[in-house]
Amino acid sequence: MKVAAVVAEILRREGVPLIVGYPVNPIIEAAAAADIRPIIVRQERTGIHMCDALGRMTSGEQVGVFVMQHGPGAENSFGGVAQAYADSAPVVVLPAGYRRSQVNVSPNFNAFLNYQHVTKHAEQITRAEDVPAALRRAFSQARNGRPRPVLVEIPADVFEEDLPGPLDYRPTRRVRTAPDPTAVDEVAAALVAAARPVIYAGQGVHYARAWAPLRELAELLEAPVTTSLQGKSAFPEHHPLALGSGGRAVPGPVHEFLRDADVIFGIGCSFTTTAYGVAMPPGKTIVHATLDPADLNKDVTVAHALLGDARLVLEALLAAVRERLGGRPRGRAERVAQRIAESRQRWMERWWPKLTSDERPLSPYRVIWELMQAVDRSRTIITHDAGSPRDQLSPFWEAREPLTYLGWGKSTQLGYGLGLALGAKLARPDHLVVNVWGDAAIGFTGMDLETAARERIPVLSILLNNSCMAVELPVMPVSTERYRSTDITGDYSALARALGLYSERVTEPSEIRPAILRAVRRTEEGTPALLEFITAKEIEYSVS
């Protein structure tokens, strides 16, 4: 059995239903022969983003696999892998490599060496007989611990070899770790003693599928809940104890309740300092539960720590807190919920004029508000792109079901959202999948709209076209005035139609919702759609 066929058979045993890639890599043809669907993208970065979403949408149960050519293919893929590493997504990356006699000769690109800092695990195969063990290590690393990309480089001449003997391979398993019982008791005591606790939930809650115990603990403690961008939708945002998600832009209640908290309990999060996450106020007692010990005391000082799978941590805490409270809440919930509702109302009153604006060009906030009213949020998966779309969407979009919002922000590559949407639709074909992006982002990955049409992946793209880089306007005034350096332009609805999508350009406020409903119907019929909204150069965000 040739090495490419061996790899395909291992993928089949690992439960991989499809691979994403770009030629030439022998694994593509071998996978097709093994009835594993190959999806070919227009550029490598989008393909890796698709694999990223496959892992996130299945809580890591399915690991996306990306394959690419040696040399330029591996070089082009670097950004996508770096994004998956920053935002903790499991992807198995299988680049071809130069022949063994040339792999370490300058200027040939050596993926094994160059990807060391953006992968959790990387290795290079030099013998055919090492393929099963290398892939076993790769899938085991991808499935366990902090989810991150792994890489196995296979030189071109290794693909030409046969595996000596029969293939002996068993699929890898996911293993969960539980927290120290003594530490659980200490944390339970601290949470029960807190007068104004706030729970901060991260992406680890999604990977552990710990949504139910998170809600139970919040209701038992009668504690408000906020999330990171990656953790958004881990807690239902229409729940009376929901504050909304953190990010660069946040709902009003988030800052108010974090400032007032005496104890902040982070679960399934890293507390990483980033411009695209909410900062923890100083002087708080921080309780940190994480899967990765490298997170502890990295960016915040931790008073109490728990290491383990978020679901096992929450289940253990629930039992310990119930014991201390006699199995029932203490009667604080109504007062806390009322305060949250009042804070949210004050915040919404401030933003209501923008959310309902009839201005022309359109307010991007009006587009987002109409979108939220037009779709069934419990059956809709949405993601943002970098810049204004992220900061305009995330505070206002009310996520109601787990894994219906794909948030990100540890790295902020323009164009990431389209690949996420395509991958999410492959994982959840029964859901409406939406990516909200701008005219800057489409310039990076827009050609993969053709991938959506060709591969029959009916996503809905909401494009906010303000003909500029709005986030940069306040920091580039001279270059904008003298050289129009922040101006960009294009007829993106025409581009989308040329690539095989249903598309409309919308300029009137009264046409926003009808256009959305028409586009949704087309996706239900199997056609991807792009709606281009001509919007104002909005630079106000909910950042305080």
Image (spheres, helix red, strand yellow):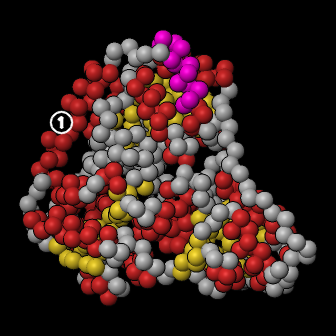
373 magenta-colored:
no
Residue identifier under label 1: 346
Part of the protein shown in magenta: 314-326
Q: Please state if 195 lies on the left or on the right of 398 as rendered.
A: right
**Above or below 448: residue 226:** above
| Secondary structure type for disc 1 | helix
Q: Position of residue 414 (x, y in %)?
A: 42, 67
- Quadrant for residue 436, please give it: bottom left
Q: Position of residue 458 (x, y in %)?
A: 37, 72
Look at label 1 and name its amino acid: Arg
Q: Position of residue 49 (x, y in %)?
A: 51, 67
For this rendering, which residue is in front, 501 or 543? 501
For this rendering, which residue is in front, 482 or 132? 132
What residue lies at 18% left-to-right and 36% top-to-bottom?
345
- The crowding category of the residue bearing disc 1, from other C-alpha atoms within 10 Å (few below 14, some 14 to 19, many at least 20), is few
- Quadrant for residue 63, please give it: bottom right
> What predominant SS class does the magenta segment belong to?
helix
Q: Is residue 122 visible?
A: no
What residue lies at 59% left-to-right and 32% top-to-bottom?
313
**Above or below 298: residue 259:** above
Q: Please state if 460 lies on the left or on the right of 358 as rendered.
A: right
For this rendering, which residue is in front, 112 or 433? 433
**Above or below 240: residue 89:** below
- Quadrant for residue 463, please give it: bottom left
Furthest residue toward right = 165
Query: What quarter of the picture does the C terminus occupy?
Result: top left
What residue lies at 75% left-to-right and 78% top-to-bottom?
5
